[in-house]
Amino acid sequence: MKVLVVGSGGREHTLCWSFKRSPLCEKLYCSPGNAGISELAECLPFAVNQTDEITEACKRLAIDFVMVGPEEPLTLGLADKIRAAGIPCFGPSKEAARLEGSKGYMKDLFARAGVPTAAYKRFNNPEEAKNYVRSIGAPIVIKADGLAAGKGVTVARTIDEANNAIDDAMVKLIFGNSGKEIVVEEFLEGEEVSFFAISDGKTAVPFAAAQDHKTAYDGDKGPNTGGMGAYSPVPAFNMEMQEQVMREMIIPTVNTMRTDGTPFTGILFAGLMLTAKGPKILEYNVRFGDPETQAMLPRLKSDLLEVLYAASKGELGNAKLDWHDRAALCVVMASNGYPGEYKKGSVIKDLDKAASIANSFTFHAGTRKDGNGNTTSYGGRVLGVTGWGSTIADARASAYKAVDSIDWKEGFCRRDIGWRAVK
Ligand code: AMP
Ligand code: GLY
């Protein structure tokens, strides 16, 4: 098969790394890719939102299968365009991608499908939202309805904080139209887990769970980021919970979406809170997680390309995935200053030393080759260094050994990835 991966992050590098090992993969393309991906795949020049150009390229290159990494092109209808060209694509339609694109739509779907989640109300008027906040009290959670680059959620500790978040979103429009409508939601407490399931529109099979580290600095301090590291499996999330989540959340979601006439083909990424009353869902994303993917795929024994291709054709059946009996842990290296302002263009040295560390692999995110063939930084999150081993502690040791062999003064990482699992 000729395969195209759409995206340029660590998640996409990991997908390319997995696909490249599949005997089904004859030729691999990625658009737009990064410096690491260019060693595995031929990179095309199109940004992920150039959906018409990507579709044209698929026809011209006679691509057999497309895997879409990020949510943006999905919400723009890339999967619909590729399927309309007769090419199987793993990723939901524009309609089905509303599950991530609109929190209000998602919460209403939870209510209709009976999926356990935080109590909520939708608002398009700031005064009504504030009255509701006053009636419930703090802590309380305020969420912009639309996509807001991961910044649309405020966990408000006080009523003042909640009111400010309402004004920011609905009056000052700091997220543009994405915040004209909001969801006000019950505050839930517990450990957070990212759980993934694959659906072909008719049925779903469990993939795996991972735990992300969202804040920038050690001890879960500092501003929120896209994710500073992850590990998998998650000891706090046992098989019984997985079965419960499949039964109470994933299967009802897939069934409801199919009955609605908007079947979901792709990966369901459930952001779970393990509360004292059992797992509840905070949100769905309609794509693989980043950096969760970098911590899950090195554990996978099955042929990922075969499974995703089957799902894209509606032929998942009762596929079962095989996993290595190992743990994996990914440490993200980010540019100094991230998630605030940072500089691009510094040279990352000694990646070859990292490559020689056993049981590890360095996935690239924001990297580019300069004119001299050096790998340089080109984004906030720059590398995802994954280690694996028979325990999470072994995986962590391999990951940090590889991290420590990389010479990049302009970057930083957390030193405590996996702390909940390794005391
Ligand atoms: P989301 O974008 O919905 O995943 O929210 C971002 C983060 O906000 C989550 O990872 C949680 O840490 C936190 N959060 C979201 N909803 C809630 C809630 N109902 N209760 C407590 N924390 C929440
Ligand atoms: N790591 C969280 C996400 O991919 O959204």
Image (cartoon, helix red, strand yellow):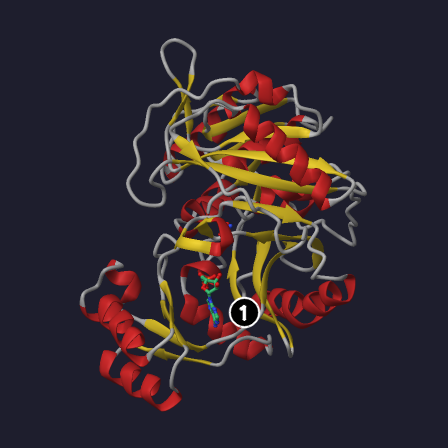
Residue kind at label 1, given as amino acid type: Asp
Residue found at the far left of this picture: 172
Residue found at the far front of this picture: 423
The count of marks equals: 1
Question: Which residue is nearer to you in this view: 175 or 304?
Answer: 175
Residue 213 image offset from top left, x and y in percent: 52, 51
Q: Is residue 285 above or below residue 299?
A: below
Tell me if residue 304 can be seen. no
**Secondary structure under the numbered disc 1 in the rendered image:** loop
For the N terminus, the quadrant is top right
Residue bearing mark 1:
260
Question: Which residue is nearer to you in this view: 19 or 416?
Answer: 416
Residue 264 image offset from top left, x and y in percent: 57, 58
Give residue 347's quadrant in the image. top left
Q: Is residue 380 left or right of residue 174?
A: right
Question: Which residue is nearer to you in this view: 299 or 249?
Answer: 299
Q: Is residue 271 left or right of residue 237?
A: left
Q: Is residue 403 above or below residue 316?
A: above
Q: Residues within 10 Å of mark 1 (few under 14, many from 20)?
A: few
Tell me if residue 369 can be seen. yes
- Which residue is depicted at the point 44% across and 21% down? 348
Q: Is residue 160 above or below residue 338?
A: below
**Label 1 beta carbon within 8 A of ligand 1:** no
- Which residue is depicted at the point 65% across and 46% down? 313
Q: Is residue 76 left or right of residue 361?
A: left
Residue 137 image offset from top left, x and y in percent: 38, 86
Residue found at the far top of this picture: 372
Q: Is residue 86 left or right of residue 125?
A: right
Residue 90 image offset from top left, x and y in percent: 58, 44
